[in-house]
Image (cartoon, grey):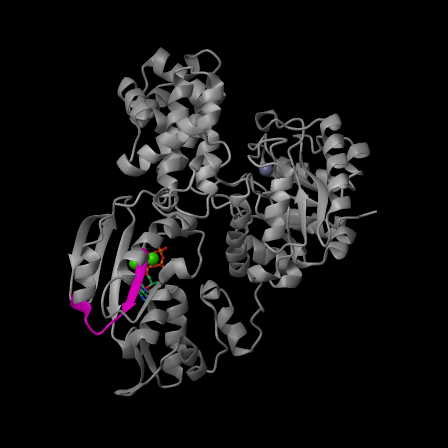
């Protein structure tokens, strides 16, 4: 059964969590966290690396000891030290740490002082107003914990697209080994590139469905078969992810692919349109009376309905059909339109790769520029830079640029927006930079009005360029902070600022609707990876998926522009 990178990272993070509860040496804790992040950022599955005898210790933050543990996870799903520490501590403690406001330190207090080790016990204690009695907790935190518990229990059961991709890859590889398979495709929300996925809809084109289904049920990662028919099989993978496998006959493939790509709302709207033309569409094909009109490609379905082809990302019934009718669909941005990345971290703050390494990778990716944007002072958890350190980085970048040809390293910073709307570094130093990403990392819980005012005030600073991760959400873990995006976009427009679409798989912040709002309001977007290591740079493609769902064209995205144009856009005065 394949062990995925996500699983390996989760095991390493769990170890770090439990060590923190046990008050272990912080360096040990950090070593596990760094290793987890490295594994998460890898573009290739770790089991493949091991199979090909590649040296894991060559990866950032991974020494021999961690390499051994990772190898053990791949072969045994866990490792000895983790088993030992788990045996010592109650099993639900790590889940408690996922609740907002609860870190290892507070979970330890809850455990030691009130004997709380499960979500249920925590909820009961919070409701009984016991939590406020713990030293350093208080009434406000008790309310916040209850609130956090609610967010947790309202969890959707949907998984990140990135995780779905990771779980799907070995399944696809397995299915490709089946005989008599013509085509194979993941449809549904996965194909529409939605930020989260409810289940996988796997379509396979074959004349021998029984063989295909038999092969599917032999996939080692299946935990349970829910139902098994002649052309449909539903199963649950070990991770809990559901898979609907459908085998389609070759002459029904295009119609089936279209149907199961959805969305449901898009399908229904198309069906209505078909009815007006005396046609009928269903998952088996397009029909005129009893006669089937043969279609071998999805495009023909749209042609028959007098529509321009609508790509899967736009099939949400949010105006795409009308636009297709009038041939006004956007020419969506593609990864190859991107000229550079505008938000990355290095070992100077909380990154795992050095500046030159990041630059080298960006060059290898074919970029023309890369902005280095390490954290500012106030972000102490990320080892934020003060003025002298930033000045030194500026010198390093100047020297590097002297040596580089056809590539420019942009001097940047991710400067914190303080609670009062001021920026965390003075203008004197900000003005020495090419661009500044300005982000909120603290005081997420201001009122909607105050939060909006805070950001707008920050935008009035002439050195404000890009609002980083604009809503602060972490998908499935933290809701966006209360903020009036429309007002913020209006202020961005007025002040010549831009909004980020942060492409980290669990951020994807802005979301698709907000991207579309920005486009409608004529505010341009920076699609940035927020990479913390070289592998992280490739997350940018996830931002492109989201940008496409938000109807963005290349001209709407500032890092499709040349370096000169970009620098001009970063100069407000
Ligand atoms: P998910 O799985 O919740 O992330 O979202 P989808 O869009 O993948 O939804 P799913 O897996 O329930 O169904 C896959 C596709 O099948 C869906 O996008 C459209 C099509 N479909 C499902 N149920 C219906 C239906 O009742 N009517 C129509 N017209 N299409 C449907
Ligand atoms: Ca689905
Ligand atoms: Ca489904
Ligand atoms: Zn940030």
Q: Position of residue 443 (x, y in %)?
A: 59, 30
Which of the 4 image quarters holds residue 434? Answer: top right
| Towards the viewer: 167 or 494 | 167
Outermost right residue? 573
| Towards the viewer: 181 or 149 | 181
Residue pictured at 77% horizontal, 55% vertical: 564
Quadrant observed for ligand 3 in the rendered image: bottom left
Residue pictured at 58% horizontal, 63% vertical: 333
Q: Position of residue 337 (x, y in %)?
A: 61, 61
Residue pictured at 59% horizontal, 52% vertical: 364
Q: Position of residue 275 (x, y in %)?
A: 36, 81
Residue 448 forms part of the magenta stretch: no
Left/right placement of residue 334 relative to residue 103 reads: right
Res. 67 in view: yes
Left/right placement of residue 415 relative to residue 150 reads: right
Which of the 4 image quarters holds residue 278? Answer: bottom left
Left/right placement of residue 416 relative to residue 114 reads: right
Tell me which segment is drawn in magenta: 200-210
| Towards the viewer: 102 or 22 | 22
Res. 90 in view: no
Left/right placement of residue 21 relative to residue 173 reads: right
Residue 301 versus residue 393 in the image, above or below: below
């Amino acid at each position: 059964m394949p062990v995925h990178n996500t699983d390996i990272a989760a095991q390493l993070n769990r170890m770090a969590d439990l060590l923190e509860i046990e008050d272990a040496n912080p360096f040990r804790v950090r070593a596990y966290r760094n290793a987890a992040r490295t594994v998460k950022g890898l573009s290739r599955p770790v089991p493949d690396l091991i199979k090909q005898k590649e040296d894991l210790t060559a990866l950032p933050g991974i020494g021999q000891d961690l390499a051994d543990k990772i190898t053990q996870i791949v072969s045994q799903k866990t490792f000895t030290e983790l088993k030992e520490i788990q045996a010592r501590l109650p099993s639900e403690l790590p889940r408690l740490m996922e609740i907002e406001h609860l870190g290892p330190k507070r979970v330890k207090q809850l455990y030691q002082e009130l004997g709380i080790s499960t979500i249920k016990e925590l909820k009961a204690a919070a409701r009984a107003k016991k939590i406020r009695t713990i030293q350093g907790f208080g009434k406000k935190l008790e309310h916040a914990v209850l609130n956090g518990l609610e967010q947790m229990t309202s969890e959707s059961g949907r998984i990140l697209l990135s995780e779905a991709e990771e779980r799907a890859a070995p399944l696809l590889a397995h299915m490709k080994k089946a005989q008599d398979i013509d085509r194979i495709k993941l449809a549904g929300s996965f194909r529409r590139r939605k930020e989260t996925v409810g289940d996988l809809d796997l379509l396979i084109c074959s004349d021998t469905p029984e063989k295909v289904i038999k092969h599917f049920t032999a996939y080692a990662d299946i935990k349970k078969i829910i139902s098994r028919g002649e052309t449909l099989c539903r199963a649950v993978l070990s991770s809990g992810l559901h898979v609907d496998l459908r085998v389609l006959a070759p002459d029904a493939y295009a119609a089936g692919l279209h149907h199961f790509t959805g969305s449901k709302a898009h399908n229904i709207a198309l069906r209505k349109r078909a009815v007006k033309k005396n046609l009928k569409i269903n998952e088996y094909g397009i029909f005129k009376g009893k006669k089937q009109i043969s279609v071998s490609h999805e495009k023909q379905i749209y042609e028959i309905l007098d529509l321009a082809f609508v790509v899967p990302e736009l099939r949400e019934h949010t105006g795409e059909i009308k636009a297709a009718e009038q041939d006004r669909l956007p020419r969506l941005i593609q990864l190859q339109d991107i000229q550079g990345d505008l938000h990355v971290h290095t070992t100077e703050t909380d990154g795992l790769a050095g500046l030159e390494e990041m630059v080298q990778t960006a060059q290898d990716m074919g970029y023309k520029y890369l902005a280095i944007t390490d954290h500012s002072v106030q972000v102490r958890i990320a080892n934020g830079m003060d003025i002298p350190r930033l000045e030194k980085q500026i010198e390093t970048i100047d020297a590097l640029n002297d040596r580089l040809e056809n590539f420019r390293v942009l001097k940047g910073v991710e400067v914190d927006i303080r609670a009062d709307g001021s920026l965390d570094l003075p203008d004197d130093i900000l003005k020495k930079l090419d661009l500044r990403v300005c982000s909120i990392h603290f005081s997420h819980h201001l009122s909607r009005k105050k939060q909006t005012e805070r950001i707008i005030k920050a935008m009035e600073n002439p050195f404000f360029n890009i609002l980083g991760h604009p809503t602060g959400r972490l998908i499935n873990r933290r809701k966006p902070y209360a903020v009036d995006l429309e007002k913020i976009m209006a202020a961005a427009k007025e002040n010549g600022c831009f909004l980020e679409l942060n492409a980290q798989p669990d951020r994807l912040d802005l979301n698709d609707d907000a991207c579309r709002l920005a486009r409608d309001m004529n505010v341009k977007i920076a699609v940035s990876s927020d990479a913390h290591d070289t592998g992280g740079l490739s997350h940018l493609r996830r931002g492109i998926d989201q940008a496409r769902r938000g109807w963005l064209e290349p001209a709407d995205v500032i890092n499709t522009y040349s370096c000169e144009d970009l620098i001009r856009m970063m100069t407000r005065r």
